[in-house]
Structure formats: C-alpha cells, structure tokens
Amino acid sequence: MSKITINIDGKEIQTQEGEYILNAARANDIFIPAICYLTRCSPTLACRLCLVEADGKQVYACNAKSKEGMSVVTSSENIAKERRAIMEVYDVNHPLQCGVCDQSGECELQNYTLEMGVDAQHYAVKDVDRSDVDWWHIHYNPGLCIVCERCVTTCKDMIGDNSLKTVPRGADALEAEYKESMPKDAYAMWNKLNKSLIGLTSGEEMLDCTSCGECAAVCPVGALVDTHFIYTSNAWELKQIPATCGHCSAGCQISYDVKHTSIDNTDEKIYRVMNEWNYVSLCGAGRYGFDYKNEVKSKDEAAFAKAIEAFKKADTIKFTSTITNEEALLLQKLKEKFGYKLVNSEAKAFQTFLNDYSEISGTKLYGYDLEATHNANFVISVGAALKSDNPNARYALNNSMTVNKGAGLYFHHLRDPVIEGLGKSIMTMYHAPLQEEAVLYLILDLFADKEKLPSDIVSYLASFHSTKTITVEEIIKEEITEIVKVMKKNEESGEEEEVEEEKKKMVPKKVSKEVEVDENRLLEILGADEKFMENLEKNLAKKDTFALIAGADLYTHPNSKNLARLLALIEKYSAFELTMIPNLTNTLGVALICELDDEAGSYTVGYNTQGDFTLSALGNGDLDMPAINQQEGTLTSINKRVNPTNAAIGYNGYELNDIANALGLSAELVVDYTPMLPVEKGFKAEMFDNLPNHYDNDGTEHRGYLLDNAAVATSGDESVAAISDEKLEGTLIYMANPVRQFTDFTNKATNLDEISGVYMSEEFLSKSDFNEGESVRVKSQKGELVANIVSDNKISGDIIVLPTFDSKINSEALFSSYRFATASIERA
Amino acid sequence: MHNEHVQEHFNNRNVTEIDSNYYMVDIAPYPTDGWGKFKRVLKRALRGELFVGLWVVLREMIRFDIHTVKYPEEKMPIGPRYRAVHEMKRLWESDTERCIGCGLCEKICISNCIRIDTKLDENSRKEVSEYSINLGRCIFCGYCAEVCPELAITHGGEYENASDQREHFLTFGDMLTPLDQMKAGTQVEFEGFGAITPHEDERVKKTPLAY
C-alpha cells in the first residue's frame, strides 16, 4: 500500500493506493452523497448515490479504488439528474409521518431529499401492505424502510450474526415506460428496491441474535428503532454526553443521550445510547445497558462516618475492576499511606500474566490492539469465550474475515454456534480444558520462524512430529479398451448390420498407495479432526497479516506463566500481532496502577464487592457510590488507550474521593488525579479536561491517549516448560456470562433481560434428564450453589456455563481460579 | 380583484418594491447644542397640552354618551387572529384530538414554556401522555401555532389569565375543545399564524398515484 495523489474536484489529495474514492473524499472533507455505504464494511451498492466521474467514466465512489493520478468529478449534469431521480424514487410511497417518526430529523432520507432539491414527484408504483413488526428489542417498520441494506451489511460484515437479509416485497413490476424515461441508475436501483424488504434470516417471527442493536443504530430512516425508545423523545431534545462504555474492556466510545425524565420529574434520565457507527460498533450491553445509575437522594452522613470508621479499622480493600483509573490510583495512594492490602483477584491474575509475558517480550504490554485485528486477514483466538468476554474482539475477528477476505481459527473448549455462524472461513477447534499450552505450542509450531526460535523449543516441537506411512486410496483414471457392438449401415448392401468395434475409454480406478505423512501429536492432543491441516492450508492461502487474540482462560490457568511466555514467543518469532483481552472494564488500568495482594486481611472494606463494610455503586452496600455513568474519569481499554468518560447523570451522594479526603488525601475532584497516573507504567501527565473524545472523518481515533508500551529488562531466558498432562474429567462447568451481560451493573439494566442460572445447551438438555427451569445443585470441590436451569441456544456441547453477572448466583465459589472445574449436578 | 392585491401584499413583504401608501414621518431635526435642547424643553413644557387632555375628559364626562367598555361586564369582541391563551383543536371528522405529539411546538418555543411527554399507545401510535404550557413564561408569540403541522395548537380569544403566581400551567385537557362544543359544531378555526393561506391549493405540487 503506497501513498498516491488523486484529484477530486480540482483538489489534490493524498490517499492510499486502492482506497475507495468515497473514503478518500470523506477523509479530506469532500462531500459525496451516499446512503448505503458503511465505513469498515464492504460496499453494498444499493443506493447508487455515490455516482462520480473518475477519469471521465461513471463509477460508484464506494467501490471504485483510487489509482495514482486519478481525476474525480463528484457531480455532473447527468449525475445530478440520476441523484435527484434516486431521491424521488426513495420518496415514492414513503409515508409523510415525519412528525411522529422516531428518527425525528436525524434522517438521511430527509436530508438528501432536500439536498437534491426534490420538490415534486414524477414516479409512482402501487404500494403493498407493509405492516410493522416487533422483533423483540428491535421494531421494524417496513413502511419507512428504504432498503439501503445498511442493517444487513453491518450485521454481516461487522457483527457476524447474519440475522437480517432482504426478502421479497411482492410488489407489482414497475411500469415499462420508466425503463426508457428514467435515468438509468435510478431505474436499476428502483427495480431492485421494488423487489425487496428486510426480513429475518432465520425465517422465524422473532429475532434471535446477540442483540447488539447495531442495525437500528445504522438505519438512516426510522424503519429500525430500539423498542424501548419508540415515541419516548425527539432526538433534538436529547443532550449528548460523550462517554466511554463501562461494561467491558473494549472501552467503546458512546454518547449517553439525556433529557429530563418527564414534565413532573426534572431529573435527567438516559434515553438511549448512540455511537459513531462508522468507527465503533457496540454490543447489546453497551447499547441497552445504560440505566444502572445509583440513585442517591442526598449525602448520608451517618453512613459516611461509619465508612471512615471502617477504613480506619480495615487492613484490606477488596474491589472489582469496574472502577476508573483515578479511583484505582486513589486506592493505591491509600495503600501507600495506610498500608492497606489491595485485593482484586482477576486483576491480580492479569497483572501476573502481563509480568510473566514481559520477561520474554521485553515490553510491559502486548504489542497490538483490536485495530490490528480488524486489519489482519488471519486471526486466531485462544482462551476466550469471545462473544461474551469482549464482543468487540468478535466483531474484529468477523470484520477481518468479511472485509479483508480473511480467515479465522477459534480455539476454545465451549462449543459456540455464534462463532461457527460467522461464516465459512472460520475454523473452530474445541479442545479439552487445560490444553491451552498445546494450542500455543501448535501455533508456534505452525507459524514461528524456526530458524530464530530458541533451539530447545524447536527440538521440543520436533518431538511431537513423527512420520508415518499410511495407505491412502486414490482414484486414478485408467484407459481401457473395450469391444462394443454397434449397428452400422453396410455401405455396399445398404443394410443395417452389427459390427464389432474397438473403443477407448477412461474409467476411474481405485488404487492403494503408500505415502509418508507428517504426524503432529499436538493435533492429536487437541483432538483435531483429520481434515484440520488440509483446511488450514486452504484458509491460509493468500494471507499476509496475522493477529492473535488471547483471552481470560489463560490468565487463571494453573500454568499461566508458561502460557504468558509462549504468547511472548509467538509474538516475537512469528508474524502474529498479539492482543490480550482484559477481563473487566478496567482490569488493565488496575493491573498497571495498583500493587495488588493475594490474600485479604482480617477486616475488609469491599468496593462493589462484598466486604465487612461495603461501598457499592449498586445501591446494596453500606455506603452508596456513583456508578460509572455518574462519574468523570478515565478507563483503560483493551486497545491500551486511556479513554475519558463523563458523568451522564447527576449523583448526590458521597464518592471515593470524599473518603480519601477525610482520610488525609487532598483533591477537590477525582479527575485531579488524572495527571498523576503513573508515567513509568505508560500513562501520561495529561489533565482530564485536555483529553479528547472523538473520531475524525477518516476514522482516526482521538480519544484520550495511548499508553506508552514501556520497555522491560529481560533476562534472555526464553525457556518454556513442557506441556503438562493435567486433565479435567467428568462434568465440566465453565465460568462465562451470556452475551450482553458482564457484571451486576448490566444485570441491573432494565433492557437487558437475560435470565441468570445454570446454562445448558439445548443439545445437552435433550440428552440429559434435566428440564429447563428446574432447580439444580451444582457441586464442585470448592463449593456449591443452587440455581435454575436455563436453556441456552448460544452454546452447544456438554459444558455447563455458570454466569458471574448476577451476585445472587455466586459462581466464583465453585472455581479455584481457572475458569473450568469439574462438578456434579443433581436436582435440588 | 381586491383579493389578488391583498395576496400580493401578503407574499411580498419588501416595502420598497410596492408603490404603496407607505410614507416617511415628518420629524423635525433633533437639537444638537445645549441652547437648542433648552428651547425644546420650554416649548414642550409650556405648550399647555395637559389642558387639552383635561378638556377632552371633561367634555366627554358631561356628554353622558361615553364609549367606555364596562369591563368585566362588557367585553370587546376579539379578532380571529388574536393570540391569547392556547387551544387544542379536535378533528371535525372524528372528534379526536389533532395533536400527533410531534413536539415541534416544544422545540420552537422561544420562551421555553412548552413541555411534552409522549409514549407508545396500545394502538401502536404516538400518544401525548402529558402536555404543559407555563403561561407565566409564555410571550404569546404564536410560533407554536405557526409551526404546528396539524393545526392542532392555536391561540384562542381567552385573555383573562391573570394569576397570583408567576408560573401557572395549562395542561392538554384544559386546552382541548370540549366534546359538547364539537357536537354543537362550534369549534372556531384559528385564522392567525399557522392557518392555511387562501391560495394553498395552487401551491401544492401533485404527487402521481398508481392506483
């Protein structure tokens, strides 16, 4: 990819070779109208508005690639005619109900109709019945739909659910005379439009997807609307608060749209969450899980005094990673001042993992981010329940496959129909728990540069290989000669007579052949099927950028040190660009800022987790704290970015800073700590108010700042222990949440209605004698719990999944630290 | 013919282009120096205009056929375009309210006195769940009536809205034309801002229909 110069409307601009003209124009503030195109997705070519003239030829700017010296004109007389006709066509039979439409002016149909100066209608076609339908969290009004297919495109190219498609409209054919009288592209576009509407791929009545709501977000008109938002507010009444989603480590940029609750109640309320869908895609938790604020009427002085007392008495602060960097720094400062133990097991595991990784990599942090995954064309995921651990990582994987013609390889234990549904080029390998080492060794074996790799590892890898002579049956074509009788006319007598003739013919024949093949015992350990290598080779054809996503299974693995070192080796000696998924919202920030301890002391103050004295933003503790959407601060994301977030709604109670001030620290605001974040760990001494939070037109992210990936001294020891033979036998339980749920905060949100319980796949339920809804006792070596069975069609196989988002089900009690355990299940 | 002239005036508000009855008021130049100003004060003070006014009052008093309207027993008729307290009109066809809850009145209100809450009703339509106008804030500019796409909110002739509090509120029900008035067919259409102009039909471009 090299820099080239093209000329659009007389303006010389720099762009990448092969970049679409539309993207090049947008990046340079040149306007080309377009409805159906989504940045980061493949061109749909539904609207045809982006028609331009490139070197004198009419092309669609959204799928025509830039070439050096190209001259582009964005409008001509003919193009203007086409565009106006296209907008007229879009207006045919479009109901004039703008007054009550939920798009309320944020409407691209309205905008372009005015832009193209449509003041009269010349076309008509008989309308068909287009009644609206409720697809659970999404409401579809086909009457308003202009079938630009943006919803279909984003669902396919970005999200990967493939839940939407175009379905027949059943309309009359267009009048024949239009073909002659109308501008060509407008007619072609109308002809297609008149035949389709949007429907569900499954053919069922209800949408059964991972419910991200991205389809409604990208809808240019009011055809797809979030059900919870219908007729609640006009868009223009809403104030947009730029923020960072506080549910997982992806740290997506969102805007909370707030307004007074009602005429009687002037308290601000979040009505919806919006995103810059061209540059960031949300998951269902981010989009619908916004009402988790902790409503506190006033400062509870008695509880505050008790909290101070508790802090004086305590020797341990236990907390979760759903806090801001500033709060983490506050806790660290309290530790330095009063010697508290800071206990946060999942952040501690991640911290240890990162340190182990640094010993070989020589850097504090993993080298890449999800942006690299988006741009790669071969992506491997290891040790992550990708769809629920970090939905954005799944989008990156899917996006790389659909848009970069890439392929993916998904290593996990839990069978996942959602991942399998991403497309043909995803390979899944479901291995047994505790075999993650074998997976990483396999990746080293397949992709690492063996010449540079430490020799002991090369020889260890070689020890898995053996050559085996196998007999393969091959079908070859063989020529045979056979004698056939044919009727022929005797030329002399003129009569028909039978003649024998020789004929040559090719027939297939089976032959056995002995061939020597390489056998890789690693594949056997992982339980790969015979076709694995063959399929992998097919998938690896023409791939040149590789990305590796490592997930939370690895951090708590009994041999996590080995895994961390193997990841570092993979990153160092292969082309893979490594990204690790931090478990929770700010696990990475906490791991960098806090010195964490393993064991709690005798008296614990819990922050968002149960302690002897509990501070809680969930409203169930001894002293209330603000939730993330009521706080200012920064969150560290998977992309190693320190993102600012703002308070969307007010909070009247005490916050951690008040306690810290009462204990002798001094800061007026929590964000006064932003410039004090540890520079040696990669943070920058930036004031909170100076942190940007937006995207440029070309997609450049201006959000907070990127962490410096500080260098770490290495010993040069790159040895890694051998694979351990540990196995988990019996019924397996796995700790993971359903999609859209992460913590108690998502559980609190009214629009996220996932039922918590013991998740079993439909397949497992039908095999076993358990029934959905039954109460069961799950017992492991560590503990037990009683909960109801929930049938989950987003998993398959025999592994039983236990969630952590509902504190009523204390799943953590069942697991030592690894996300897998063996358990027995019986009716309670 | 007369009507056409009126329409022309209505559409073309550029005064200079109309050979109309507009004329400049004859105003004497203002004094610039101190002496001039002093002279003006003397001239105005000693003119005896006060007594002119007093004489008019005395004359009218002794005539006994006074034109004073005895408010509140008597009230002047109000013009159809007068902008007093708001009304919510109903549809002639079905007696249901015209308001669709679009919220344009709330948006356009320059004194920020209108608020509207909407929701999805059981017929999947947008329903106004609450509506309020703070009459203490309203400046009766008429923008709400002008912007209303349904001719639903209008101004009425009810100008007696004094209250003992600065803020007092009108709700949807207060403004809605009572049903008995609808039955009697006495709902009065507003002719002011926002009402349909007389030549609207000619301005509309027709949309072809394929039925």
Image (cartoon, rainbow, N blue to C red):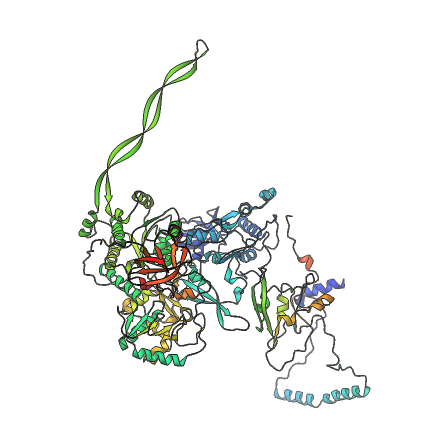
Q: Nearer the viewer, residue A17 or A407?
A: A407
**Residue A16 in view here:** no
From what the image shows, is residue A767 above or below residue B150? above
Left or right for A270, reference A178: left
Q: Nearer the viewer, residue A146 or A286?
A: A286
Query: What residue sits 29% from the left and 66% below the top?
Result: A345
Left or right for A220, reference A358: right
Q: Quadrant of the C terminus of chain A?
A: bottom left
Q: Position of residue A632 (x, y in %)?
A: 40, 71
Q: Position of residue B66 (x, y in %)?
A: 79, 83
Q: Position of residue A57 (x, y in %)?
A: 48, 45
Q: Position of residue A363 (x, y in %)?
A: 26, 61
Image quarter of residue A392: bottom left
Image quarter of residue B133: bottom right
From what the image shows, is residue A294 above or below residue A541? below
Q: Nearer the viewer, residue A124 or A187?
A: A124
**Residue A758 in view here:** yes
Image quarter of residue B200: bottom right
Left or right for A522, reference A2: left
Seen as rendered, the residue at the extreme top is A493
Query: What residue sits 78% from the left and 89% below the top?
Result: B58
* Count of picture labels: 0
